[in-house]
Amino acid sequence: MHQREIVGYYARTGCEEDRLDTGIGRFEYVRSKEIIQRHLSPAPQVIVDVGGATGAYSLWLSERGHAVHLVDLVPRHAERARERAKATGVDLESVGVGDVRSLPYADGWADVVLLMGPLYHLVDRDERLRALQEGKRVLKGGGRLICAAISRYASMLDGFRARLFDVPEYEGIVDRDLQEGQHRNPVIERDFFTTAYFHRPQELREEIAQAGLVCDRLVGVEGPLCAMNEMREGLDGRGRYYQLALKYTRAVEEEESLLGASFHLLAIARKPATDRVAGEARDDRAQGDEEESYTQLHMVWPERRLSAPPAVRLPPGYTLRTYRPGDETRFYQVMELAGWPGWDDERLRPWLSRILPEGWFMAIHQESGRIVATAMALHNYTERHPFWGELGWLAGDPAHAGKRLGMALSAAVTARLIDAGYRHIHLYTEDWRLPALKTYLKLGYVPSLYTPDMPERWRAICAQLRWPFTPEEWEVGDGTRHWGLPRTARVG
């Protein structure tokens, strides 16, 4: 039903071709092109523009020497893209009608996949994951997937910018967008967009990671300035205020606290050169899997800090305790809220034997009495790490984000491991978990550069976090092996 609504909307309005030519649409187009261009290798690259509409990005990329294949769900869009290519003398490699969830391309074939619209028209999470996994399938190892999303707060911001709240039904639209991310337009005669899903920034990162991709960057396209009513006259492509808007939007495009204030988000992701889904690899490691392809981020607690366990500081309104029988049900709920669905008694069972006594910590919201965050102090026995303690499964309810509960739990686990006598303490995590990464860095953990791609991955992470990139102070190797750099080498 949703697909018919969406196709009907674009067939009825016919607005997609003109949307990027004026006003805020033009600003979005200029910004999106410059962000895409930064992450392309020199032409020719094989690029698949999925949901490419009437060819705005395909024609531009083809003119720059790339081999571009456009596919779109709307037949009229594909037809119009062919007409525009012919009229401008641009050669597109192919133009077709197709579905992002089942692409007509071979495995490992493309250098770049663009999803500049399809993701927000898939209102079910499973369908979005399927689309991302399909894009990943088509990519070569190391290839780029660049995808757009609409911010959870876009309709609220646009409502004030364009005085849309004058329409009585608009307030209800915004209320549902904010609460559920599910955008619906009951006012057919007004162009309040069509059926869509509006993301929180962290949700987009999580979906990309769960699809088995690495999210290197998440960028606000238009930034917060375009939501200001005063900017409506400054987005005509000319004049000082247009240039200033570009300058300052670029300056804050990766500022975590401002990402949601951009109408559109653009994620720059890549398919790992060795293709394993991070969540699967994490569980494999617990079972002693020692494959060399494993590429989660690795961080260690410096030996020089073993004599100074971190202090546990909880915010007002919260307490900390260890596991009690019956906590399992709420633990599974917290894990799902944090982006790790599928936890149950069977999945938990192999971890129970590895948790230290009094080492499974729960943060409790005093007013409700509910568990809102959790972390485990684990004994980590593998051939690679036979005598290491591990900080594992740090997770929290997003409704309690920003309370520094992650810092308190990480400190509690680290202190418990030190108290238990571990001389080697570490953790594994993912590139997209930026708030957790900042917590670990602030607490005192340092990156372990245990594969050749780690320096560049950490360079990108540090840029997003505005954290000093100091690889000369970090661990080279994982404590048991190295990949060619002496421990004293300067990386980068």
Image (tube, rainbow, N blue to C red):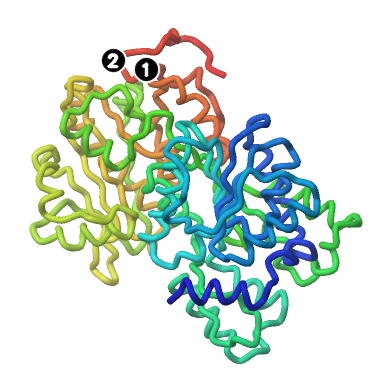
Q: Amino acid at mark 1?
A: Gly
Pick the residue in front: 196 or 476. 196
SS under mark 1: loop
Kindly identify which residue carries mark 1.
477
Q: Position of residue 367 (x, y in %)?
A: 29, 71
SS under mark 2: loop
Quarter the C terminus occupies: top right
Residue at 44% over, 7% down: 486
Q: Quadrant of residue 186?
A: bottom right
Residue 379 is left or right of residue 172, and the answer is: left
Look at the image and tell me whether residue 159 can be seen: yes
Pick the residue in front: 273 or 411. 273
Q: Quadrant of residue 401?
A: bottom left
Q: CA distance from mark 2 to mark 1?
A: 7 Å
Q: Are marks 2 and 1 in contact (CB under 8 Å)?
A: yes
Kindly identify which residue carries mark 2.
480
Residue 430 is left or right of residue 47, and the answer is: left
Quarter the N terminus occupies: bottom left
